[in-house]
Amino acid sequence: MAEITVIGSANIDLVVNVEHLPQAGETVPGGDLMTTFGGKGANQAVAAARMGATVHFAGRLGNDAYAEQYQTHLLREGISLPLKEPVPHAPTGSALILVDAHGQNIIAVSPGANGHFTPEDLDNCEKVLRASDRLLLQAEIPRDTIVRAIQLANTANTAVVFNPSPMPEGFPWGEVHLDYLIVNETEAQALIGVDTTDAESLLRGAKTLLARSMDCVVITRGAAPTLAVTAQETLSVETQPITPVDTVGAGDTFAGAFAVATAEGMDLAEALRFANGAGALSATRHGAQVSLPTRTEVEDLLR
């Protein structure tokens, strides 16, 4: 069984479904407010757990009622928690999400306790990190903490899967080793620094990223084929045809499933197909973690 350590954010998501996303200054009517568990780190941890991995999630929660509810939720998902103490004088992180009739969304995030996740907090995570097959990271926690986590994984020879979302400013690309980088088209363009309007230019740009101490670059493109490059191969893997109702959490589902698939020894094409299936299923349901599929559901879809 794969063992995954996820270090990252945990948020309470406040979601409203609307007919269309508002323009600046526009007020739009919406449905009932939904309060759900979210945050990219916790989303990816739950995704990996539902794919059958042993998962450790290190994240910071606030000194409020949400913290205990969140810990109980993660434990019920079978996830261990190396960091349990709340951050004093800080609320649990939150995200304000609007989802339109086509499943597209806009999100505003208040970091709360996530912003108080320090490199020193990782002292309690070294043991599980050394025992893990993968370290899975995002970028909703401070940059210095992300860098320290990767350094610890590099020292422990634990493969790193980094999903730099949102794109961190001032990240020391090339100074730490990444086994897998997962980005969407917008993030890829920010990294590559050139127009990436077609698959060929994306692949050319992705190859330049390998020189920044990366073994594999994966670019997700919504409904378009997922691209991946290594020093040995270039891949374009079709996604599953679906009608999306809510894309919140789809990228996190992909990342969690991909980490598990590669840890289990699937080759890159198999891992991308598996992760594409998981991400597609999550986009057919409303919410972040409540929409995450089980492994059986993904395998049934792929059959």
Image: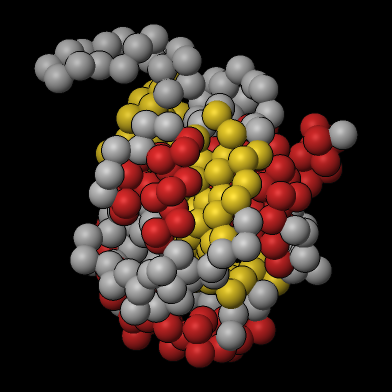
Q: Quadrant of the C terminus?
A: top right
Left or right, 44 with reference to 194? right
Q: Position of residue 263 (x, y in %)?
A: 71, 67
Residue plotted at (25% across, 16% down): 22
Q: Residue at x 62, y 40 (%)?
A: 236
| Side of 163 where 6 appears, left or right | right
Can residue 178 be seen from the camera position used here? yes
Judge whether 210 appears above or below 272 on screen. below
User: Residue 117 sits in which quadrant?
Assistant: bottom left
Task: Pick the residue in front: 14 or 247.
Answer: 247
Q: Is residue 34 above or below residue 132?
A: above
Note whether residue 59 is visible: no
**For this rendering, which residue is in front, 274 or 7?**
274
Query: On screen, 30 above or below 182?
Result: above
Q: Residue furthest left?
A: 25
Residue 138 in the image: state x and y as whole percent. 43, 59
Q: Nearer the viewer, residue 160 or 80?
A: 160
Give above or below for 294 relative to 199: below
